[in-house]
Image (tube, grey):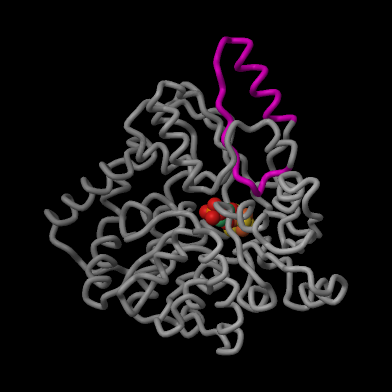
């Protein structure tokens, strides 16, 4: 995995993943030059990172975004993208961009009969579970996730046998068949609140061991948390020692560093953090801090969050430390989206057994009830 250093001085020019250029595997339609120029300017402004996403790159992706947006209109498709998708997707073609909780609600509530989910597989499956009558397209069928791929329905069944009657909470980063075995689903924006509200003095939490530990700490004295052994390969890269060393270096030069971390990080990182939250909450907190002048920020999460902060913050922000890219999230490119919109391959259409949908839906409905 590649850790990308974020350069303190760089501001809008900090070192980040390079822009994914079109692979040339899917040829977009030909558009008049003026239309391409206008679209390139729109992308350039919206992405707001003039060195990595310069006009030349924006021009080269414009035919793709133009055709995608045209097809979306013609076919009445709602395009959802997770925050970790690349800026060309987030600012070029997405109708809704956020964390997994907000996006599962967006999928449920969208009036369109077709949803295209630009993200990893479990998120597209979640969209199908909450809106089974809709056609859900997932452009990159092999975009997995180390958490959802690391646990099976059988693992949950075994835990339920070992601890009969104990409620099972599963992180949304799980397959439909795992969700079907759980009582309630949770996300990074509600896991503490929901686990706290479950009945009894024990809770089984799957599959993220770091979030499980965080819940255990939060519920110390009131509940025992039985934890599965999964982890996110991206957030597991960060360590408490690295955060401490950055804090010390910054404080030695009089910089007040604000550390914002995703809850998929280990306890050492979370203990050193000033704020813990979902990808969307991290972005909002970074922008809030910058708006009150506290703009030396360390974002401990996937690079997509930093990309969004750079694009959307109206205030100067110094992002310090490094971000890590999720190879699964970055699998989807504009060309995959265009191809899936034109004529999806069978594996790009989410199909889930009806019985599994029915049971998995209960755990998601329970999440919506307890989260709000
Ligand atoms: P969020 O719900 O915070 O966006 O998290 C999803 C995820 O996969 C983080 O790695
Ligand atoms: Fe899964 Fe981690 Fe990638 Fe999120 S960042 S999709 S949890 S591997």
**In the image, residue 117 above or below residue 16:** below
Residue 220 position, x and y percent, is 78, 46
Q: Is residue 84 left or right of residue 161?
A: left
Q: Which residues are magenta?
A: 241-266
Foreground residue, 364 or 252? 364
Q: Is residue 203 above or below residue 155?
A: above
Left or right: 144 as drawn, with respect to 286? right
Q: Is residue 257 magenta?
A: yes
The spot of residue 359 in percent (x, y) is 61, 82
Residue 166 inside the magenta-drawn segment: no
- Against 225, residue 217 (above or below) is above
Q: Position of residue 327 (x, y in %)?
A: 58, 56
Compared across the picture, whether 201 is left or right of 234 comes to right
Name the image quarter holding residue 317. Answer: top left
Q: Residue at x 35, y 77 (%)?
A: 114
Q: Residue at x 38, y 65 (%)?
A: 335
User: In the image, ligand 1 is in what quadrant?
Assistant: bottom right
Q: Is any part of residue 3 visible from this angle?
A: yes
Image point (40%, 81%), residue name: 135
């Amino acid at each position: 995995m590649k850790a990308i250093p974020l350069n303190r001085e760089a501001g809008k020019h900090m070192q980040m993943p390079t822009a994914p250029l079109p692979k040339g595997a899917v040829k977009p339609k030909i558009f008049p030059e003026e239309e391409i120029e206008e679209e390139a300017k729109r992308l350039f402004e919206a992405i707001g990172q003039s060195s990595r996403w310069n006009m030349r790159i924006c021009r080269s992706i414009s035919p793709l975004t133009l055709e995608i947006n045209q097809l979306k209109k013609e076919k009445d498709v709602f395009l959802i993208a997770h925050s970790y998708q690349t800026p060309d997707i987030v600012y070029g073609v997405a109708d809704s961009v956020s964390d997994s909780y907000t996006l599962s609600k967006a999928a449920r509530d969208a009036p369109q009969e077709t949803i295209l989910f630009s993200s990893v597989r479990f998120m597209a499956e979640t969209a199908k579970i909450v809106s089974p009558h809709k056609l859900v397209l997932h452009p990159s069928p092999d975009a997995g996730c180390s958490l959802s791929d690391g646990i099976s329905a059988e693992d949950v069944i075994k835990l339920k046998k070992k601890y009969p009657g104990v409620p099972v909470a599963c992180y949304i980063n799980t397959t439909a068949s795992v969700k079907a075995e759980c009582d309630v689903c949770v996300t990074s924006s509600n896991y503490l609140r929901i686990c706290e509200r479950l009945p009894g003095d024990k809770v089984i939490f799957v599959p993220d061991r770091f979030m499980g530990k965080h819940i255990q700490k939060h519920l110390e004295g009131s509940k025992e948390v039985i934890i599965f052994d999964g982890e996110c390969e991206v957030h597991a890269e960060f360590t408490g020692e690295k955060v401490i060393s950055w804090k010390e270096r910054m404080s030695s030069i009089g910089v007040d560093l604000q550390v914002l971390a995703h809850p998929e990080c280990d306890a050492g990182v979370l203990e050193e953090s000033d704020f813990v939250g979902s990808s969307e909450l991290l972005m909002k907190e970074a922008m809030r801090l910058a708006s009150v002048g506290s703009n030396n920020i360390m974002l401990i999460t996937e690079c997509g969050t930093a990309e969004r902060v750079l694009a959307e913050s109206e205030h100067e922000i110094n992002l310090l430390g490094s971000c890590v890219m999720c190879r699964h999230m970055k699998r989807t490119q504009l060309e995959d989206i265009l191809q899936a919109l034109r004529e999806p391959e069978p594996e790009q259409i989410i199909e889930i057994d009806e019985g599994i949908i029915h049971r998995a839906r209960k755990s998601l409905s329970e999440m919506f009830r307890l989260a709000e």
